[in-house]
Amino acid sequence: MLETKMSKDRDGWTATTRIVLDTGVKSDAALGDEKGDRVLRLVTCKANRGGLFTYASVAIESEGWTTTAIFGDYNKVVAKSADRCTEAAVRRMHDAVLTQVDATVAEAKAFYAAKAKTDAAADLEANDELHERGMALLKKTEELANAPVPGALINRVS
């Protein structure tokens, strides 16, 4: 069962539902090694230009902190409406979005699965590049070690 919190502030009513997607996840945006829960938040509230909208966003929650990677974490507008920001309208729209929450959760999980594959591919590419550079450096070192030493240089050293 999902728990939805309703609140009211200067902009009107807001409905928020939290869904834990994964636990023990390290955030890309975190400075330390702390790990937390990857949480999907569904929020229905007043839009800047009037009406209502519901957005889904994912962040890492750890020890009272919320961390998100801008342009790197899942974020999507799920629904829009021209309704006024009343408690009933917010609740109605949020409940309608929650009937399709499984699709939103699946989309968010697919986003992170694809991101993990892309990150792994980038890591492999970086490792391949480092390996090639290291091999080129090793070859150059061997060439220099096996190169003949000019006579003038030998005479100065001895």
Image (cartoon, rainbow, N blue to C red):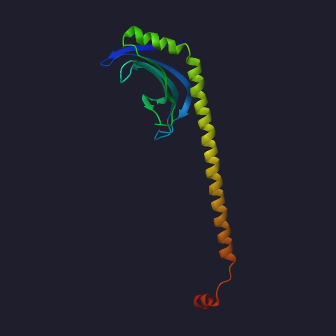
Q: Is residue 42 above or below residue 132?
A: above
Q: Quadrant of residue 92?
A: top left
Report if residue 158 is visible in the image.
no
Residue 39 vs 131, above or below: the answer is above
Which residue corresponds to the image point at 49% horizontal and 11% vertical from the top-left?
95
Quarter in which the C terminus is drawn: bottom right
Q: Please state which of residues 18 and 79 is positioned toward the viewer in this rendering.
A: 79
| Furthest residue in direction right, as rendered | 146
Residue 38 screen position, x and y as percent: 52, 28
Picture coordinates of residue 106 (x, y %)?
Answer: 60, 24
Q: Residue at x 70, y 77 (%)?
A: 146
> Image check: 133 left or right of 25?
right
Q: Quadrant of the N terminus?
A: top right
Which x, y percent locates residue 86? 36, 11
* Residue located 47% across and 40% down the image: 32
Horizontal and vertical percent position of residue 50: 36, 20
Q: Is residue 63 visible?
A: yes
